[in-house]
Image (cartoon, rainbow, N blue to C red):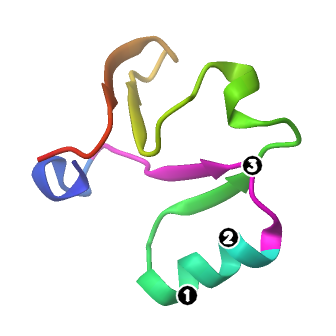
Amino acid sequence: LKNELGESNFRYIAISDEPFEKIDYFKKRTQSSFEFYRLQQKLNDIGVYTIPTAYILNNKGDLVFKHVGQYN
């Protein structure tokens, strides 16, 4: 999705419920430019059951797009 939308006007973040060590390993291995955050609760607790799940919010915080699964 990032490849299609580009960098301008978007902020890309990744949210995980995994341990910091695993998040850090993934970030280094993929050389990702995303900002990474760790949840204190499980993703399932907030309704995320599939990885990846992508959300796009506008500048007001309203959900304008959601995609579950790999984006092609």
- Residue 7 in the image: x percent, y percent? 26, 57
- Residue drawn at the location 70% of the way across and 54% of the way down: 37
- Residue drawn at the location 44% of the way across and 23% of the way down: 59
> Which of the 4 image quadrants contains residue 69?
top left
Separation (CA) of disc 1 from disc 3? 17 Å
- Residue 34 in the image: x percent, y percent? 48, 63
**Which residue position is annotated with label 2?**
23
Find numbered disc 2 in the image and state the secondary structure of the residue it sits on.
helix
Furthest residue in direction right, as rendered = 40
Find numbered disc 1 in the image and state the secondary structure of the residue it sits on.
helix
Asked whether disc 1 touches disc 3, contact meaning CB atoms under 8 Å apart, the reply is no
Task: Point out the stretch of residues depicted in magenta.
Answer: 9-20
- Residue drawn at the location 42% of the way across and 36% of the way down: 53
| Foreground of the two, 13 or 42 | 42
Find numbered disc 3 in the image and state the secondary structure of the residue it sits on.
loop
**Which residue position is annotated with label 3?**
17
Relative horizontal placement of residue 20, taking residue 22 as reference (left or right) = right
Query: What type is the residue that disc 2 sits on?
Result: Ile
**Which residue position is annotated with label 1?**
28
Graded by Cα atoms within 10 Å as few (under 14), some (14 to 19) or many (20 or more), the crowding at tag 1 reads: few
- Residue 2 vertical placement versus 33 (above, below): above
Query: What type is the residue that disc 3 sits on?
Result: Asp
Graded by Cα atoms within 10 Å as few (under 14), some (14 to 19) or many (20 or more), the crowding at tag 2 reads: some
Asked whether disc 2 touches disc 1, contact meaning CB atoms under 8 Å apart, the reply is no
Query: What type is the residue that disc 1 sits on?
Result: Lys
| Foreground of the two, 48 or 13 | 48
Separation (CA) of disc 2 from disc 3? 9 Å
- Residue 65 in the image: x percent, y percent? 30, 20
Question: Does 12 appear in magenta?
Answer: yes
Task: Say which label, 1 or 3, has the lower sequence index.
Answer: 3
Relative horizontal placement of residue 45, taking residue 49 as reference (left or right) = right
